[in-house]
Amino acid sequence: MVSMEIQAAIAKIDRYSSNEEGNKVEIIERPNGGISIVMAEGKLSGSRSKGVTIKAVHAVLNLIAEGVPDGASARVVLQRIRDEHRDIAEVNISIISCDLQSSTIVITKNNPIPVLIYENGESRFLPLEEDAESHRYDPVVYQFEFQLGQTFILISEGVQNAGVCNDNKIDLRTALGSIYDEDNDESSVQDVADNLLQQAIAYDSGRPRDDMTVVVLRVSPATFKDIRREYVCFPIKEELS
């Protein structure tokens, strides 16, 4: 059996001229092995809400850390937020997990924002339920057995809608294809995340109209046995005048 590892990368940028994050993404080790990456974007009475977003992400992470399955974790948190804010708050939650217990990649989401899958030189979208509205509080869960080279890309609404206001919306599959064409399928997960984010920013003329986040996760041949590595780059912003 070929030794495998999970490689993951995150690239994100806040909306132009804003110091307040509209979406948040966090990573955690699963209690039975593997990792989970949770991305959320909350709204309160139709406006962006940093408080709802942070509350949702932390609550999901806590439940996953206790061993609660991803789908149940998301469902509980969505209902909790709905009850607490009397239906005036909503949140998009997307979770991607490498579950070593089941040897699967698990994707959980309650929103119609697309997920890209790249394998064997081709990209496709994760099939979405037709009635996305019915899953706002009842997330859909997808599972994939580990396949070497399979890459999953989660994005935020800001990336999905890049270029809309310029009547030139980004074509995500074309954007992803250009990354691999240039690098002959050898791009690192961080390269893919960074490049896709930069293309989305360019479609918004260099000034993102919404927070943008790209999460990339790939099943790869193991490089260093039993060694876990993390890399973080976090910008220190100057206060806007």
Image: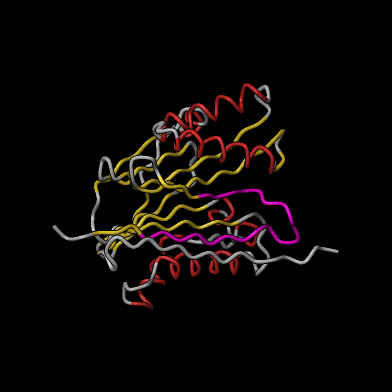
The one of 26 and 168 positioned closer to us in this rendering:
26
Give the residues in magenta: 7-26
- Left or right: 118 in relation to 48: left
- Left or right: 7 in relation to 166: left
Q: Please tell me which residue is depicted at 38% across the width and 78% down the height of the picture.
A: 182
- The colour scheme of the drawn protein is secondary structure
The one of 133 and 153 positioned closer to us in this rendering:
153
Q: Please tell me which residue is depicted at 43% across the width and 29% down the height of the picture.
A: 72
Instruction: Classify residue 179 by image quadrant.
Output: bottom left
Which residue is outermost to the front? 226
* Position in image of residue 116 (x %, y %): 39, 54
The one of 121 and 141 positioned closer to us in this rendering:
141
- Which quadrant is home to the N terminus? bottom left
* Position in image of residue 171 (x %, y %): 47, 61
In magenta stretch: residue 10: yes
**181 relative to 44, above or below:** below
Instruction: Classify residue 78 by image quadrant.
Output: top right
Instruction: Classify residue 221 by image quadrant.
Output: bottom left
**226 relative to 186, above or below:** above
* Position in image of residue 18 (x %, y %): 74, 57
